[in-house]
Amino acid sequence: MTKRSIPLSVLDLASRPADGTNADAVAGTVRLAQAAEALGYDRFWVAEHHGMPAIASSAPAVLIAGVAAATERIRVGSGGVMLPNHAPLVVAEQFGTLRALYGDRIDLGIGRAPGTDGATAMALRRSEQGLGVDDFPQQLLDLFGFFYGGMSDANPLHTITAVPGLGDAPQVWLLGSSGFSAQVAAALGLPFAFAHHFAGENTEAALDLYRSKFEPSDLLDQPHTMIAVNVVSDEDPQTVRALSLPGQLSFLRMRQGQKPQPVSVEEALAYDFSPLEEEFIAARNARQAIGTPDEVRARLDALLGSTGADELMVSSGAATVEGRIRSLEIVSELYPAA
């Protein structure tokens, strides 16, 4: 297969449609993955969120297995597994099993945030142990020990073997939206994926920090970066508005401390946004790629130029599966294989 000027990937949240079911949500994810594979995308990742009525991607390893079974070539992974929510041994066993099932198609993107509220994070971990920022680097080292061996004798876990897991490591990425994650990725010599789709103000600074601090490792000899960008595109500007508004209203409600139900296109179009809310949405969209194909190309080119990212990940906030597929089609047409 010929190469594109920039490798393209997809991040999906298994969004539940308004008046739809969780089965509809995960079926939509599978459809989107199959479309991405047909369009020549390199990777398809699913996120981890808990307790969100509009999002069904709470169990990435399970969803990855379903997506990988329904596809043939595309790499499938997590964007990401929120490591503080899980014992590193369990993650090693799960992703070792996925790699045993699907070979070298599995990616493990690892994040530090809980992907939920504090009470749910406690329910997942059943204690406060391991939930602090300072615990994250050791959790990563434990996970790598289970995958690659060589755990220090001083580590009380060193006698434990992950089966599957040891010798079955997927491709590992560190995810982040801050300078802290950038420095951890750099110190461990890991590829770094930045969550620009919801933290677009700090992207260039974090990637610059990652590159300046990068230490080569057995996994990676030079810095390698990817940015995730929210893309909603169509030739018709009114269609773009209709498909993007539900996601924007949901994000607004989450920032207000709610756990919103799925928002329909009709509800979003009828909603009377206050001037402050309009300002919030405009600021959030300023560095995303929402618009006609020409507008999207201009935004993406500008971001790729300012960040120097090695890969581009499309996270489409379109309200329908058809809208998300169309956004992938447009990006694929904008950056065709040579």
Image (cartoon, rainbow, N blue to C red):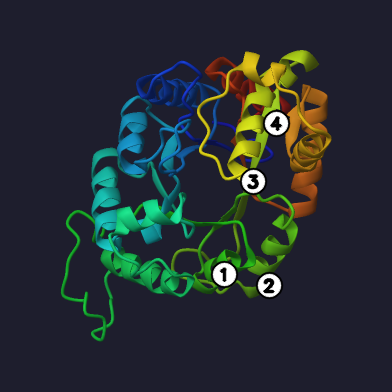
Residue 186, numbered circle: 1
Return the disc, 2 or 1, that comes first in the chain's sequence: 1
Q: Residue at x 45, y 64 (%)?
A: 219
Q: Categorize mark 1 by other alpha carbons within 10 Å: few (<14), some (14-19), many (20+).
A: many
Q: Residue at x 80, y 37 (%)?
A: 282
How far apart are labels 2 and 1 at the CA level? 8 Å
Q: Earlier in the sequence, mark 2 or mark 4?
A: 2
Residue at (51%, 68%) from the top-left corner? 189
Amino acid at circle 1: Ala
**Disc 2 residue crowd, few under 14, some 14–19, many 20+, Cα 10 Å:** few
Sequence-wise first label, 3 or 2: 3
Separation of marks 2 and 4 at Cα, in angstroms: 29 Å
Q: Using residue 120 as the reference point, say whether residue 193 is left or right of it.
A: right
Query: In the visual, does 55 lie left or right of 302?
Result: left
> Do the numbered discs 4 and 3 sit on residues whose CB atoms are within 8 Å?
no
Q: How many other residues sit within 10 Å of disc 4, few (<14), some (14-19) or many (≥20)?
A: some
Tell me the number on the disc at residue 105. none
The answer to whether any part of residue 3 appears in the image is no
Where disc 3 sits, the SS reads loop
* Residue 176 pos. (x, y %): 56, 57
- CA distance separating discs 4 and 3: 23 Å
**Marks 2,4: beta carbons within 8 A:** no
Query: In the rendered image, which quarter contains the C terminus?
Result: top right
- In this view, the mark in front (4 or 3): 3
Quarter holding the N terminus?
top right
Q: Are marks 2 and 1 in contact (CB under 8 Å)?
A: yes
Q: Against 149, is 64 above or below?
A: above
- Point out the tag, 4 or 3, that comes first from the N-terminus: 3
- Can you give x and y, in whole percent of width and height, for residue 183 in the image? 58, 71
Q: Which residue is mark 4?
A: 335
Q: Residue at x 70, y 22 (%)?
A: 271
| Residue located beneath label 2 in the image | 212
